[in-house]
Amino acid sequence: HDDHLEKRSQPGAPQPNPVDLSPLTWGDVNIIHTTDTHGWLSGHTKEASYSADFGDFSSFLYHMRQQANHRRKDLLVVDSGDLHDGNGLGDASPVNGQYTRPIYQKINYDALAIGNHELYVNDVAENTYRDFAPGWGKRYLTSNVFIKDSHTNKTVPIGNLYNKFRLKFGTRVMSYGFLYNFKGAANNTVVEPSNFTVTLPWFQKSLKEDVDMYLIVGHVPIRWAEATAVVKAIRAAHPSKPIVVLGGHLHVRDFTVYDNRAFGLSSGRFMETLGWMSVDGIKDRACRVETNCIGKNLTVTRRYLDSNVYTYKKHSLAHPRQKFDTWKGRSITKEIFKVRKTLNLSNTIGCAPQDYYLARYPYTDARSLLNLVANEVLPTAVVNASRPYPGVVIVNSGSQRFDLFKGPFTLDDTYIVSPFHNDFIFATVPYKVASKMLAALNGAPFQKRADEALPAYATNATLTPGYVTKDDYGYGGDDWKHSTIPYVPSPNYISSPLPTGLAETDLVDIVWLSFFTNLVEPILKKLDPATTYTSGIYRRDVDTNSMLLNFVKAKWSNTTC
Ligand SMILES: O=c1ccn([C@@H]2O[C@H](COP(=O)(O)O)[C@@H](O)[C@H]2O)c(=O)[nH]1
Ligand SMILES: [Zn+2]
Ligand SMILES: [Zn+2]
């Protein structure tokens, strides 16, 4: 399944009736949006609906730009960040992102924002600053994200604070790039709250430029205060200027209407979705006097495209027999294929006996990935049987990122399911303390906020499962009509089973991930104020990513698929 040039003709590849996809609506300005791609440049090798790779995406953009020229309409291509952590292509290399960064660079994005996954690790932040941002010139936008330059010791924006530019058919755009109020950034970086940034002289000065629209590229959920703060600041100065927010981070399809001339779009995750937005009315000459257009509607459409070659061809080609692959697109596909080979990403380590889903079933269900992790992976691959005490291992459920499908389990899958290299930390505590830790953690503030609920879903049993999105325009934004996939929330932390038959004072190793040590330490103090526990690394040979690899080697390697 690794031959990307052939995969489009695979059995099971999407073959809808052509009338199923209605043509896109074009406006004065049109936007193609990606977000939270997390290195999935190969596309989904196990899911035909999302099987387009970045070479295909490049070819698609070529044809869309041709179409825009033909229609004499402006087209913007935008990315909202989170390029790292999530796929072997970016994460299995000696330096994280060393092969994916140059491939991203081949896509002619007009504007990009930085994501939190560019900022967890000092080296990734430094490489983003040195090796990635410069290649984009003013298009890499970090209005509120800074780095301490290791050569000069000065704290500087990682990219550009803002960028004013003119599109081919005349639209003048003022663009910014905002990150949500991320608290876990590496210590060589600084994230400024957006409601403070918008008060700064440079931002206020930028609002005095004469432009036709504002583009906020954000690694920010479009409904969060960090996004609305920027919309409000622009609106305070410009009562009717069109504002578009292109957000991300929550990995959802969503669209919101801030007012009748300000809109936000969020385009999913993992190269499953290309967001499309058309905005008509921007060129209205009467609106050059802003007070003329207060309350006047812009005509805006949104569409969430499933990222496969069928979709790409259907929307971008002038006629169905036109050649789709461009020379550049094919060469990107070949490069991806080559990197996958170099990194042995398709090497099969074992055979998964069934599908395990991240969020389709309750975590107590045998089809749940979190159930597999809690009851099989942690006891097998993390608990250290040579320790004098039994171990109880707790992980954050957010450390598990994607479904695990029945059949060949590859090296790539270890990164797809959990790309992180968080260490396991432990303290030896009485059973009565260990037994209360999971509940205490699940009562602690969530790492993401409560308002991140997925949009509501509709049901339809006759269609193939996929996205069914409800947003501020209602249903109808999904390009492909799907039946809903159930979504069941799970606890924020899950644990291997507690040992049985112990007295309250018997000692136990309580084990957790370095990612949330800051939460565990105060809980230990609260549960047992009299004792100060020392913590250390539980095992040096296993982390979040390698635990699944070790489990598969131990339990699934002798089975054939
Ligand atoms: O080292 C890490 C870093 C992150 N996580 C998990 O990822 C999410 C954030 O991912 P987004 O793609 O930005 O939504 C974070 O909340 C953690 O759940 C991790 O487990 N370990
Ligand atoms: Zn993300
Ligand atoms: Zn994110």
Image: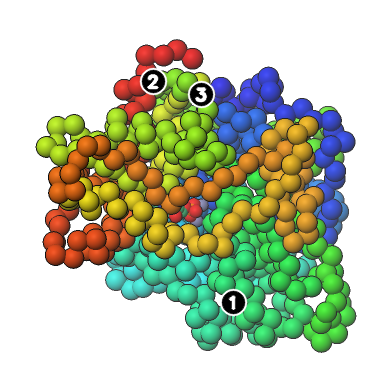
**Side of 219 relative to 191 (left or right):** right
**Side of 154 relative to 4 (left or right):** left
The residue singled out by tag 3 in the image is 354
The residue singled out by tag 1 in the image is 229
Q: Distance from label 3 to label 1 (Cα)?
A: 46 Å
Mark 1 CB near ligand 3 (8 Å cut): no
* Residue pictured at 39% horizontal, 20% vertical: 556
Front label number (3 vs 1): 3
Three-letter amino acid code at the position of disc 1 = Ala
Front label number (1 vs 2): 2
Give residue 17's position: percent from left, percent from top.
Answer: 84, 30
Q: Is residue 305 in view?
A: no
Q: Distance from label 1 to label 2 (Cα)?
A: 50 Å
Task: Assign a secondary structure to mark 3.
Answer: loop
Give residue 286's position: percent from left, percent from top.
Answer: 88, 80
Quadrant where the N terminus sits is top right
The residue singled out by tag 2 in the image is 556
* Dots 1, 2 in contact, CB < 8 A: no
Q: Which image quarter: residue 113?
A: bottom right
Relative to 154, residue 133 above or below: above
